[in-house]
Amino acid sequence: MNQIKIKGTPDLGGIGATIGFFIGFAAVSLFGVTAGRIKEVIDLSPVLIGLLISAPALSGSLLRIPFAAWTDATGGRKPFLVLLTLSIIGMVGLWFILHFYYPGRLTIGFYPVLLFLAVLCGCGIATFSVGIGQVSYWFPHSKQGTVLGLYAGVGNLAPGIFALLLPFALKYFGLSGSYLAWLIFLVVGTGVYWAIGRNAWYFQLLGHGMNTQEAQKEAQEKYGQEILPGGNVMDSLKISAKTWKNWALVALYFTSFGGFIALTAWFPTYWNIYFEKTIIAAGLLTAVYSILTSLMRIVGGQISDFFGGERTAITSFLIILAGAVIMVFSASFVMAIAGSVLLAIGMGVANAAVFKLVPQEVPDAVGGAAVWVGGLGAFGGFVIPPVMGAFVSNGDHTGYARGFYIFIVLAIISLFISMVLSKTHHK
């Protein structure tokens, strides 16, 4: 057993997982900036546009649950590579269609294919839950907050950065050229992950033929690994599913993180059509929203530690409510910017507050609860954009403002849930 060679270090493991999540999570912006170009040649309704830009969030949310369970069984390396490979396949197909059929031969008949390819590309979004496990197993308890905050914060910057870069790529490379550049980035990033992304000591020892007990003992005694898979993940999922507070947290994350994904995808269309901004300006405004939300998630963790998860959640959903009201009734560009900034601040802090509450509200099944919350909560990114699109009727652009009524409703529901959690905290 002394001949076993362990590859990687905690720092490289964390960097590898962060790179993998960053390149996969960028798919949130897959069609947000380019939907207008596609609409120019395919006459899509606002609902169909909303469905197209949200399609990556379908696989990106639902696949988090099974792949998180797989990570606990085998480590994160294989799940990461499978998800990123599926994203590459989707991007190859998307580039092929845009290169050979856009614009002259791209018809409504291609719409289901575009949806399917978007779902494939969205598999990379599901790397979030894989990376959480992979990073956690590398580091001791004392460093979990810092490393996971960096992992989530840096990874969450990807959609905003891509929303900013895509308009410039469109200008210089064209539509198919932009996705070819994205494909190259995805392939290179996957290669970097393959080179440096490693499982923690316990999983590597298992891979060299040790049984579970031997691997646990050597990982702890020789390498100092503190966090190990704690029992059957399916059991944890079942236990947490029976707790009403688990579903309360899912609802809160549906509003905050699902809302974040939804608006990162929706805002380019909103700014471009409702306020008639250029694609570059719309991308810049979307990037400001997305990046600010991601940065506020990091700050939100510290705020939650100081004030408590419930108070932080209540305050953040009040901010979201204020931002949504402004977005609905804003007739001016400046007011809309103010509303989007409030939404970014509220959602970023709320995202951190929800995960602060997970171990507190579901202490007997933290792992399972985190998977439910992260997976089903992110499903909001798929559901919300088509609902917002339903408010828009042909020729009447005021529906782009009315679509934010959905966030008024979600914020009020989330406020009520947060207050109930606060009242039942000690019961």
Image: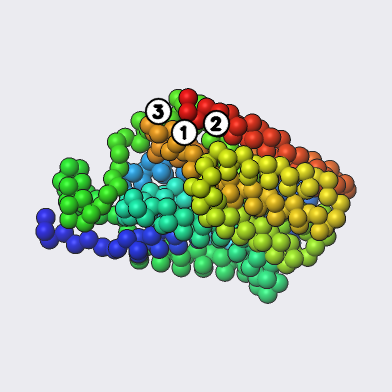
> Considering the numbered disc 1 on the image, is that residue within a helix, a strand or a loop?
helix
Give left or right: position of 26 versus 81: right
What secondary structure is marked by label 3?
helix
- Which residue does the image show at 86% across and 51% down from the upper left? 331
Query: Which of the two discs, 2 and 3, labels the residue nearer the N terminus?
Result: 3
Residue type at mark 3?
Ile
x and y, in percent, of residue 59 in the image: 53, 45
Quadrant into which the N terminus falls: bottom left
Name the residue that disc number 2 marks.
421
Q: Residue furthest front?
A: 306
Residue 97 visible somewhere in the drawing: no
Labelled pair 2, 1 in contact (Cβ < 8 Å): yes
Q: As rendered, which of 422 and 124 lies closer to the eye?
A: 422
Q: Which residue is mark 1?
A: 361
Q: Position of residue 25 (x, y in %)?
A: 53, 55
Question: Label 2 vs label 1: CA separation?
Answer: 8 Å
Residue pictured at 48% horizontal, 24% vertical: 427
Is residue 387 depicted above or below 327 in this figure? above
**What residue occupies the far left of the structure in this picture?**
2
Mark 3 highlights which residue?
Answer: 239
- Amino acid found under the numbered disc labelled 1: Glu
**Which residue: 40% across, 34% down?**
363
> How many numbered discs?
3
Classify 10 Å Cα crowding around label 2: few (below 14), some (14-19), many (20 and above). Answer: many
Q: Nearer the viewer, mark 2 or mark 3?
A: 2
Foreground: 221 or 66?
221
Whether 357 is drawn above or below 262: the answer is above
- Circles 2, 3 touching at the beta carbon (< 8 Å): no
> Between marks 2 and 3, how big is the CA–CA gap?
19 Å
Identity of the amino acid at label 2?
A: Leu
Residue 210 in picture, x, y percent from top left = 16, 48
Which residue is pictured at 64% across the width and 35% down the height? 415
